[in-house]
Image (cartoon, rainbow, N blue to C red):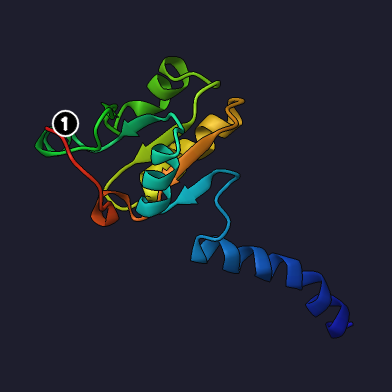
Amino acid sequence: MQKKILIATIPLIVFLLMAATGSYAAGHKKITSNEFLNMRADGAAFTIVDVREVELYEAGHIPGAINIPYYGSHERVVKELSPKDNILFVCHGGPMGDDLSALLLENGFKKVYNLRGGMRRYKGPLEK
C-alpha cells in the first residue's frame, strides 16, 4: 500500500521541484540576456514590456521598451498588447514577468518570454 502511494506521488514531487527551480514556467520561455540580444541581432522583433516603476524605467531601460508598471498592469497588458507579437517581460528579477506571462498565455497569447534575472542580469545597452 505504501509503495503505491509513493509511486502515485512521484509526478507531484517532480512538478513541485520543477516549479521551485524555475524549470516550469507556465508555458512561457525564460531567456537570458544573451539569448535575447542574440535573437534581436538575428532580426527577431519584440514588444518589450518593462514592468518596473516609472522612476526605474526612466533611469535606464532596454532600448525600445515600453513601461507598464506591474501594479495595475494585469488589465492593461491583455488590452494593450497584441497576441501576434513576441512579448518580452522585464522586471527587477523575474517573478513579476512570470506572473504576467502566465496571464497572457491564459488569454490566448502564444509567443511570450520573460527575461531571466530581469534587469539585474541584463547585460545590453540602455536608454533613458
Residue drawn at (58%, 33%) of the image = 105
Q: Position of residue 118 (x, y in %)?
A: 31, 50
Q: How many marks?
A: 1
Q: How dense is the environment of label 1, judged by Cα within 10 Å: few (below 14), some, or many (20 and up)?
A: few
- Judging depth in this view, the residue of 3 and 73 nearest the camera is 73
- Judging depth in this view, the residue of 53 and 114 nearest the camera is 114
Where is the N terminus found, in terms of image quarters?
Answer: bottom right
Q: Position of residue 5 (x, y in %)?
A: 82, 76
Residue drawn at (75%, 71%) of the image = 9
- Judging depth in this view, the residue of 97 and 65 nearest the camera is 65
From this view, report whether residue 115 is shown above or below residue 73.
Answer: below
Q: Amino acid at mark 1?
A: Val
Q: Position of residue 50 (x, y in %)?
A: 29, 35
Where is the C terminus found, in terms of image quarters?
Answer: top left
Task: Classify mark 1: helix, strand or loop.
Answer: helix
The residue wearing badge 1 is 54
Q: Residue furthest front?
A: 42
Residue drawn at (16%, 31%) of the image = 54
From this view, report whether residue 26 is shown above or below residue 61.
Answer: below
Q: Position of residue 93 (x, y in %)?
A: 31, 53
Indicate left or right for 121 with 76 as reference.
left
Q: Residue furthest top?
A: 79
Q: Residue furthest bottom?
A: 2
- Judging depth in this view, the residue of 39 and 94 nearest the camera is 39
